[in-house]
Image (cartoon, rainbow, N blue to C red):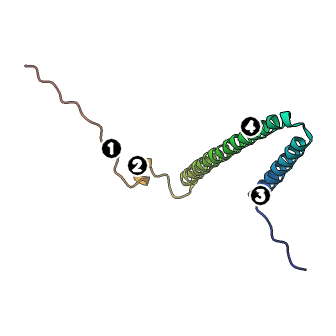
Amino acid sequence: MTARKKKSVRGTAKSARQRARNAIEEGFRDLERRLPRNLRSAVRDLRANLRALSQQMERARKEREARWRRLETQVRRDAARLLRRLEKAVAPGGSASRASSTGRTPRRRKTRAKKTPG
């Protein structure tokens, strides 16, 4: 027996949305056939409006997911950077000052020039 090909979560969700959309469309077509002629145009308009709403919702969902992915990536990067800093801070190897650990000499303070009375 061969293994089944696995679908991704996105592919499964996409096909589920497609099946639901097709079922709704089929229901509206059936309703349109059953109604008298003067009400068919209302059902057609309703179907068009519902399709537009569905497209807007899908676009908003995609934007939300993209925004969430960007935010999640940024949080992961920040967490990894903080973890590296923490590991570096608690790493054994002497108590070197921060300036020497970065490889630079400490900054000198600026001295004020003394005013001469004059």
Which quadrant of the structure image shows residue 40? top right
Inter-mark Cα distance, 1 to 4:
67 Å
**What residue is pinned by disc 4?**
49
Which amino acid type is shown beneath numbered disc 3? Val
Assign the C terminus to one quadrant of the image: top left
Q: Nearer the viewer, mark 3 or mark 4?
A: 4
Residue 107 tag number: 1
SS class of the residue under badge 1? Answer: loop
- Which label's residue is closer to the chain start, 3 or 1? 3
Inter-mark Cα distance, 3 to 1:
54 Å
- Disc 1 residue crowd, few under 14, some 14–19, many 20+, Cα 10 Å: few
Residue 93 vertical placement versus 53 (above, below): below
- Disc 3 residue crowd, few under 14, some 14–19, many 20+, Cα 10 Å: few
The residue that appears at 63% across and 48% down in the rendered structure is 66
- Which label's residue is closer to the chain start, 1 or 2? 2
**What residue is pinned by disc 3?**
9
SS class of the residue under badge 4? Answer: helix
Q: Nearer the viewer, residue 10 or 84?
A: 10
Residue 4 locus on image (x, y percent) = 85, 72
Q: Nearer the viewer, residue 6 or 43?
A: 43
SS class of the residue under badge 2? Answer: helix
Residue 102 locus on image (x, y percent) = 42, 53
**What residue is pinned by disc 2?**
99
- Relative placement, left or right, of 12 versus 69 is right
- Which label's residue is closer to the chain start, 2 or 3? 3
- Which label's residue is closer to the chain start, 1 or 4? 4
The residue that appears at 89% across and 36% down in the rendered structure is 36
Q: Are marks 3 and 1 in contact (CB under 8 Å)?
A: no
